[in-house]
Structures are given as C-alpha cells and as structure tokens.
Image: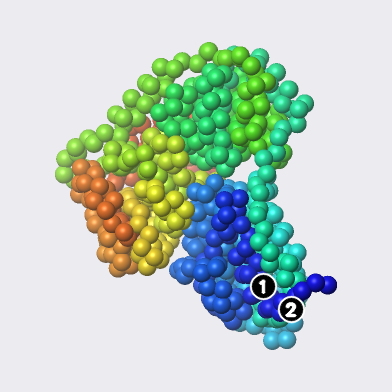
Amino acid sequence: MGQTIRLTAAQAMVRWLSVQMTEGGERFVEGIWAIFGHGNVAGLGEALHGIGPAFPTWRGQNEQTMAHAAIAYAKAKKRTRAQAVTSSIGPGSTNLVTAAALAHVNRLPLLIIAGDVFANRRPDPVLQQVEDFDDGTVSANDCLRPVSRYYDRITRPEHILTALPRALRVMTDPANCGPATLAFCQDVQAEAFDYPVAFFEPKVWHIRRPQPDARELAEVAELIASAKNPVIIAGGGVVYSQAETELGEFATRHGIPVAETQAGKSALAQSHPMNFGASGVDGAESSNAVSVDADVVIGVGTRFQDFTTGSRALFKNPDVKFVSLNIHGYDAAKHGATSLVGDAKVTLGLLSEALGDYKATAFDPAARTAWLAKVDDHCRDRKRPKGELPIDAEVIGAVQRTSSEATVAMCAAGTMPGALKLLWQPSQGGYHMEYGYSCMGYEVAGAMGIKLATPERDVVCFVGDGSYMMANAELATAVMRRIPFTVVLTDNRGYGCINRLQQVCGGAEFNNMYKDCNVEVQPEIDYVAHAGSMGAFAVKAADIADLEAKLVEAKTRDIPTVIVIDTDARPGPGENGGGAWWDVAVPQVGGPERLEKARDTYIENALNQRVLN
C-alpha cells in the first residue's frame, strides 16, 4: 500500500495543488480567489488557512469578477499559469457561469472549486439548494457543465485522486484548454481519508507542442505555393503558442500580409511591415482590401469568428480557398478549410521550410502606410470648442501619445473594442481584448489580472459607462492589494454601441441611451465620486489635452487611477475603418421606411455569404 497521510479532502486538495509546477519552477495554479459561505468556509476555508502562503488565498468582491481576474491573468501568462476560484453553494456557484463561459470561448485555463450540497443528503434541502423534482443528483453547479471543459462532482474524499489530475490535464492541454469545474460536496470537504504520500510529490506539467501530420503539411504547402494573393489571419493561438517571432519571420520570408483578429492583435507590433491591421467587421482598409481579393486565406490560431470574416462575406474571390493551422481539429476544419493541425510555433517553421523560396508579391505595401497615416489623423486632438465632446478615436489617441513599449491597452465590450482594434497601435504584446465572449464587466477585474501577471507592464483599461456600471467592485480589491492600473472611463450616458447597431438595423433609438429609456428622471452618475469611494484615485478630464496630462500623472501611483471623460455617443471619422458587413438579422416585415432600407441592405449583403462547414 505504501505510506499514507490522514487529511481532509479539502486539505489534500490544496496540498496537491501547491506542488503542481510549471517548467519554470512556479506553481501552475498560482493561488485561489475566495468568497466564503456555507459550502466552502468550514472545509475548504480551513484547509486554505492552514496551508497559508504555500497556496495563497485572495479575497475578491464577486465570484464572477474574481474569475475574470483569474482569466485575464491566464491570458496574460499565455496559458502557462492559471488561478483558481472557489464559491459557496447556490448563488456563489451560479455567479461563475458567465466567467466559465468566457474562459471556455477563449480557450483559457480556469480552475473552479464550487461548493456543493451534502453528498450524504441528511440535511436536504439545505439553504440555497436548487432541487430538481425529477433528478436527485442535480445541484446549481450543473449550470456549469456546458461551460466547462472538464466537470466532476466530488462525492467521496478519494475522488480527488483522479479528479484533480484530470482537471489539470485539461487546463494544460493546448488543444482542449478551458475551465475545469470541481463541484465539491461540503460534507466531503471535511471528511478525512488516508491519502498516499506519493500523491503529494511535486509534479511538473509540460505543455505539449504537437507536430503536424506530414500529409497535411505537404498538402497545405502545395496550396499556398500556388497562391498569387494569399493573406494570413492571425488569431489568439499565435499568442498562446508564443509563435509571434515565427509568424513575423514566415510572413516576411514569403511576402504574405497579416491581418489580425481581436485575440491575435499585437502578436506582431503595429510597426511590423507585414502587419496590415485589423480584419473584418472592425477591420482596416489595408487588411480588408487584401482579404477581399485573396485566393488563399491562411488562418493561424483563429476560430474564423463572424467579426473576423465579415460574417463569411469578406472574402469575395469566387475561387478563394482556406487553410487553417490550428491546435484543435475542430477549429482547423472550419469554413471548409484544408486542415493543418499542430502547434503554431512548430508548424510555421516546418511550413516555411516546405515552401522554400516561395514569395507572394501581389500586395501593395503602400496601402499599409497610407492607412496608418489615416489612423494618426483620426486620433489627433481636434481641440474642440467648449461644449463639444470628443469621440472615442480622440480618447485612444491621447492614450497612444502617452504610451510606451510597456503599455497594454485592454477592453472587452461596447464601442471601444472595435475602435481599439482598428486604431490602437501596439508594441508586441501591447493589446489584451476579451472579445470571444465580448463580456461587459470584464474590464476592471481583467485589468487587475493583467497587472498581477505582468507587473512590469503599464496597463490601461478602456471601459464605457455601461460596462463600468455592470462590474466595478474589484477596484476595491486592487486598492487593498496596491495593484496599480489606469481606467479610462468614457461616459456617453448609456449603451452607445448597441444604440448605433439598433439604428443601423433600421430600428428607432429605444432603451439603450438613458434619454431613450422609460424613466421619470435621467440619472446623473458621479463616477469620480463612486470610484473614489472605493479608494481609487479618481478624477475627471476636461478635454483631450487634460486627459493626456492625467494619464502621465497616473503612472506614478501605486493604486488604480480612474479618469472619467465625457464622450460623444456618435461614431467619429475613421471608427468604421474599412469595416466589413456584420450579419445581425433585420425583421422581414413591419416598420417604417428606415427598416425597409435596412432590410434591403441586409439581403444584398447576405448574398455574398459563403455557405461552408
């Protein structure tokens, strides 16, 4: 049998997690975010207190935003490290569903240890227990099943001997990476068991780099070699694979322009001569022009999401073919692509060797420089007269002019993600966008997670007033822990992004801007006072020049700085760029003339959609 040690299941879990290491000698799961309640305070809480700094515990304000911070941390670490989150049963667990979905969509590791009901069922129904009238095995944690890559319910103390290694295998698997949920019955957490001592020996987790199949590699090389107008679509998989250098070398050697997705932006610095800018709906003129005529589209680490492909209507060459280099076969087969399954870093090198001296020359390098000159113009300070509000592009310009090679611009939802993808000019690694799930409320917590992962970076969080209202409480956490970052809060008095979309789709302005809501009194929210009440340094910028000055001052502080600036909700010049069409369904009947015009435009664009796998 071997030597054993008697521990509670919770004590054994945290001891095991504390010795799961990276190749660099650090804990893979750095620590755990916790809000305690019944379901995790007596069992897991006692175990976490006992282990202390060997597996640290951090207090947050909401389970969802704690998980957002953990996800941003893992993304900034390029999936080489992760964090855990624990919840009590009931609302604590269901608060995690949105965050788990975010991690799932973005293929990011997150360990969820959710308190669960009693395995012995003696006190059922307990406080906050969700009962299924037809299934006695169901609890609130079952909501996490469809948004978890791995799900397990711990109903016996020895279950962790198999459940924990399985969870980390998923979290460290580059193909199947995502959130792992362990629903931990509260009585089992406190139950003792004689665990093998060998279970707690340190283990190093290696993240594999699968090589491509030789036949697939040869087929893809032959296809690219026949191309006259190829284009590369660089996705988040380039960053996760740490293949930024290989992508730049491949594009340069073979003369293939690179267009970026939200997740792939800053894999190449904006200054890289083969970086033609953003792709798709929120795309640049330079990159979309190349994509429209492309005869071979080479996806590298991208899911070919609708924003990237203009809802499958961007690539208009009737003979266009798709190649997809991806770590997962599911993604590699999208759009009827010729699949090339493998690690991006390894596979780009092998593909380059197979292509030999092949070099495409059909693209126009001047298109890139012409577009960047327009970006500078769009983002300049227009010195608006008093009473005339700046647009998002001018706010971006102010941050850009005060940025450095160390700056990371981050955001998640609303108008600003599209404007940033189009107009922000990052250094390599200087962009962090959560747009797979486009989750409002990710911003503040995400900025904190990025700063924790990369303390050497200057993190600037762009957030609209709508997203700020959804989730801002982790500002208090950042103040408590002295985690400095800068929040640029653009106040356009409502959901300006969706208000624009509503009008583009032929609808009337309704229920998005405060002025269009069915309310007696328009809210006048003092965001400076609100952020200041949580301990942040908060101030309002009078104009773009004042914003620049306040951004410089923010770099000197050891707590978060929140800078509020009023902005115009209307789109400004340049913010639509060379944007492609986005498929948002327009009602087929009813409505005034504006709806009929929107429907005609919708039908016209839909005719360009490619119907593929």
The front one of 439 and 410 is: 410
Judged from the image, the secondary structure of the residue bearing numbered disc 1 is helix
Q: Amino acid at mark 1?
A: Ala
Q: Amino acid at mark 2?
A: Phe
Identify the residue at image location x=55%, y=30%.
Answer: 247
The front one of 402 and 77 is: 77
Q: Is residue 172 above or below residue 94?
A: above
Is residue 308 left or right of 173 when viewed as pictured?
left
Is residue 345 left or right of 409 when viewed as pictured?
right
Q: Residues within 10 Å of mark 1 (few under 14, many from 20)?
A: many
Residue 142 visible? The answer is no
Judged from the image, the secondary structure of the residue bearing numbered disc 2 is strand
Residue 8 figure quarter? bottom right
The disc, 1 or 2, on the residue closer to the chain's N-terminal end is 1
Question: From the image, which quarter does the C terminus lie in?
Answer: top right
Residue farthest to the right? Answer: 1
Residue 242 figure quarter? top right
The front one of 276 and 570 is: 276
Identify the residue at image location x=53%, y=55%.
Answer: 71
Which residue is identified by label 2?
A: 193
Q: Residues within 10 Å of mark 2 (few under 14, many from 20)?
A: some
Residue 49 visible? The answer is yes
- Circles 1 and 2, Cβ within 8 Å, touching? The answer is yes
Which residue is identified by label 1?
A: 12
Residue farthest to the front? Answer: 3
The front one of 14 and 261 is: 14
Residue farthest to the bottom? Answer: 123
- Distance between the alpha carbons at the discs numbered 1 and 2: 9 Å
Identify the residue at image location x=65%, y=74%.
Answer: 10
> Residue 127: where, in percent of width, then height?
61, 82
> Residue 531: where, in percent of width, then height?
31, 63
> Residue 184: where, in percent of width, then height?
67, 72
